[in-house]
Image (tube, grey):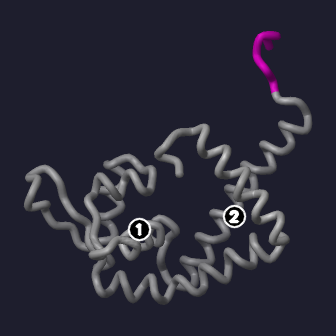
Amino acid sequence: MTNDIPWLNDDEQHMWRQWMGLHAELLATLNREMQADTGLSNPDYQVLVVLTDSAEGRIRVSDLAASLQWERSRVSHHVARMEKRDLVSRRGCPDDGRGAFVRITETGRAAIERAAPAHVRAVRDLVFDALTADEVAQLGAIFDRLRSRIGPSAG
């Protein structure tokens, strides 16, 4: 190891490893619970959340990719799998022959309406019930500050 690398000290290394482990365990636990309760995966849920948050229940594929911070190819493959389950549909964009819209279907809307209460309960149980209101505010401020260092697409 060279001396010009600002290696993490023991506290920083411990915190980083704890964060990475927590992130992986939290996502895996939420995914398992959602799959068991609803048959949806976390990525399915993320796509459906973005679609239900959009005014018309649809969004351009490129905007969906940006919102999820996924590559366009990942979005296309995932949307294709969701289409087979009738959760979403994909249609060409009339204004742009190369673009496409992803739209939530009635099946997709029903699926997220069933999934959301259990997801919120799990997030509350696993995260927010373990924290005080001050800790939630502190973590929110810390996450905002860290995400602002990554770039404008992060927030």
Residue at numbered disc 2: 26
Q: Position of residue 68 (x, y in %)?
A: 44, 56
Q: Nearer the viewer, residue 56 or 116?
A: 56
- Residue range in magenta is 1-7
Which residue is found at the position 76% from the left and 50% from the top? Answer: 19
Specify whether residue 23 is in view. Answer: yes
- Per the image, label 2 sits on a secondary structure element best described as helix
**Eye-nearest disc, 1 or 2:** 1
Residue under label 1, please give it. 50
Mark 1 nearby-residue class (10 Å; few <14, some 14–19, many ≥20): some
Q: Is residue 85 visible?
A: no
Q: Which residue is located at x 41 percent, y 68 percent?
A: 50
Q: Which residue type does callout 1 highlight?
A: Val
Sequence-wise first label, 1 or 2:
2
Q: Is residue 3 above or below residue 48?
A: above
* Residue drawn at 35 percent across, 58 percent down: 64
Q: Residue 106 vs residue 46: left or right? A: left
* Mark 2: few/some/many CA within 10 Å (<14, 14-19, 20+): some
The kind of residue tagged 2 is Leu
SS state under label 1: helix
Q: Nearer the viewer, residue 145 or 120?
A: 145
Q: Is residue 115 magenta?
A: no
Magenta stretch, main secondary structure class: loop
Q: Is residue 8 above or below residue 24?
A: above
